Image: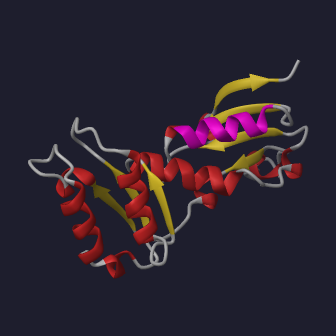
Amino acid sequence: MPDEIINRVSNSVLKVFDLEDYYVPGPRIVIDLKDWLEHELILREKDFRERVKTHNWEQYKSCYVAIYCSTDAIVPDWAYMLIAIALQPHSAYTASGDLVALETTLYQNQLQDLDLTEFKDKPVIIKGCAKKPVPNSAYIMATNLLKPIAKSIMFGEACSAVPLYKRK
């Protein structure tokens, strides 16, 4: 039938790797240590420890928490560690850095033990246009994981993919 429309994308051997499939759902919260410092710059140990002791940590229940300082304050490592210890019974996961660093760590945890056999010797497209927050680092992780096994790697959508790699 000459007028029949054939979906060549769905009939191809092209495999789609969608990073949104590995997005960890749940609320994200950032703790900016500048708010815990005197004049947003000076950490006074006694005051800091008291604030950690009296802070409502329950509000972070099942949340993914990023701890960082947005000012140029010199914050000792133990301050981050003290907050992480207080968060541990409540948060789903705690990371050092901003939201991008948190998302990067969550993707790294998701992708590190992934079974990629379905992509072996296949042309792979790493899907773009994410609706969820996918950091650039996650695309790099996916590329690093797929390059040793994929026949080729493209980025975008099947209708308008950008070629990135082709095995010789």
| Residue 37 left/right relative to 151 | left
Residue 3 in view here = no
Q: Is residue 81 left or right of residue 161?
A: left
Magenta residue span:
137-147
Residue 144: x percent and y percent?
72, 34
Q: How many marks?
A: 0
Q: Is residue 143 magenta?
A: yes
Residue 147 in picture, x, y percent from top left? 78, 32
Above or below, 86 relative to 104: below
Magenta stretch mostly in which secondary structure? helix
**Residue at the top extreme, as displayed:** 168
Vertical position of residue 17 compared to residue 21: above or below: above
State the residue lying farthest toward the left. Answer: 39
Colour scheme: secondary structure
State left or right for residue 56 relative to residue 138.
Answer: left
- The residue lying furthest to the front in this view is 46
**Displayed quadrant of residue 120:** top right
Which residue is nearer to you in this view: 157 or 131? 131
Q: Residue at x 46, y 46 (%)?
A: 101
**Residue 20 position in % (x across, y down):** 58, 56
| Residue 36 coordinates in the image, percent (x, y) | 20, 57
Q: Nearer the viewer, residue 72 or 97?
A: 72
